[in-house]
Amino acid sequence: MSAPLRENRVVGVLGGTGPLGLGLALRWTRAGETVMLGSRDGKRAQEAAEKLAARIRSENPEATPHICGAENAAVCAATTTLVLAVPFEGQAGLLKVLKPVIQLGSIVMDATVPLAASVGGRPTRILGVWQGSAAQQTAELLGPGVQVAAAFQNVSAEILASADPAHEQIDCDVIVCSDHPTASQVAMDLAERIPGVRAVDGGKLENARIVESITALLISINIRNKAHGAGIRVTNLPERTTR
Ligand SMILES: NC(=O)c1ccc[n+]([C@@H]2O[C@H](COP(=O)([O-])OP(=O)(O)OC[C@H]3O[C@@H](n4cnc5c(N)ncnc54)[C@H](OP(=O)(O)O)[C@@H]3O)[C@@H](O)[C@H]2O)c1
């Protein structure tokens, strides 16, 4: 992605007080992105943002982290670059509430995984989603004025947030699926702002169903191997995959 497109970008993370939102925000803020954490409770988001900023300053006293927190609706009003990081059971309800304030032309990068655990089932099972995937549900709920990309479903929040130097580089590809080239480009660019991550163009949004399922598989692999944060790599690709 060209530098001018990045200029003045504010990355709004809806559900940014959870492990995934915080992990992504940590990595992006460290990389120099301006991040706005969203929450149903503005104060909770502010406190989470202050904690992340303090962590970054303690790691590097020279750093000037650009991160703040606000209610989810205020985040949508403030930026058109949004990441959705909420549990599946809350996804549709939250989007219905936020739809009136999500700006036309916004890019929404959806990390939601419809794990059965979100409705009391097993964490290794995926729920059937009428639209095909959680990301397609997002696209349907937000309508044609918003560009949805599915991304970040396979990256471990625990590894993103880890203070272990061994996890400074994230050993995982981020597969991006979207029907909108600009949304794909933005999601792939943000993915590669995370050290070690390679973004892979995964094609149309309908492929999000497969990527979401991989997360359930990775959880199962973690359990069987007593591991945390298993990730995926797609091999034998040329330097950059584009459509
Ligand atoms: N954790 C991971 O390693 C990981 C990795 C890849 C993908 N994912 C997927 O990414 C999403 C977020 O994961 P997470 O582990 O960060 O989830 P989480 O902790 O369950 O939730 C994230 C945030 O969403 C908000 N939230 C919770 N219930 C909500 C509801 N009913 N309506 C609206 N907002 C609600 C909460 O923020 P407030 O209470 O502050 O509003 C919470 O802090 C999930 O769909 C998950 O499957 C997770």
Image: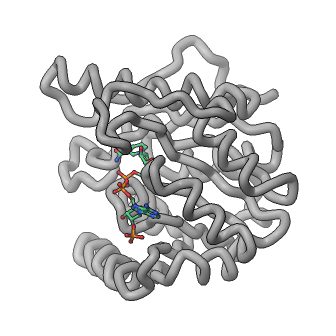
Please determine whether, in this image, residue 204 is positioned above or below residue 46. Answer: above
Q: Which quadrant would residue 237 be assigned to in this image?
A: top right
What residue sits 64% from the left and 33% below the top?
Answer: 130
State the scheme by which the image is colored: one colour
155 displayed left or right of 100: left
Residue 49 x %, y %? 38, 78
Q: Is residue 61 visible?
A: no
Q: Is residue 159 above or below residue 237?
A: below
Say above or below: 126 vs 41.
above
Which residue extends farthest top?
236
Residue at screen point 65% across, 29% down: 132
Q: Nearer the viewer, residue 28 or 86?
A: 86
Furthest residue toward left: 226
Whether residue 106 is visible, yes or no, is yes
Q: Is residue 84 left or right of residue 77?
A: left
Quarter containing the C terminus = top right
Tag count = 0
The image quarter containing residue 169 is top left
Residue 94 point in image, percent of width and height: 56, 64
For the point 86% across and 53% down, which residue is it? Answer: 144
**Residue drawn at point x = 42 percent, y = 25 percent:** 232
Residue 229 image offset from top left, x and y in percent: 28, 35
Taking the image in four quarters, ligand 1 sits in the one at bottom left
Q: Nearer the viewer, residue 137 or 206?
A: 137
- Give the image location of residue 200, x and y in percent: 62, 30
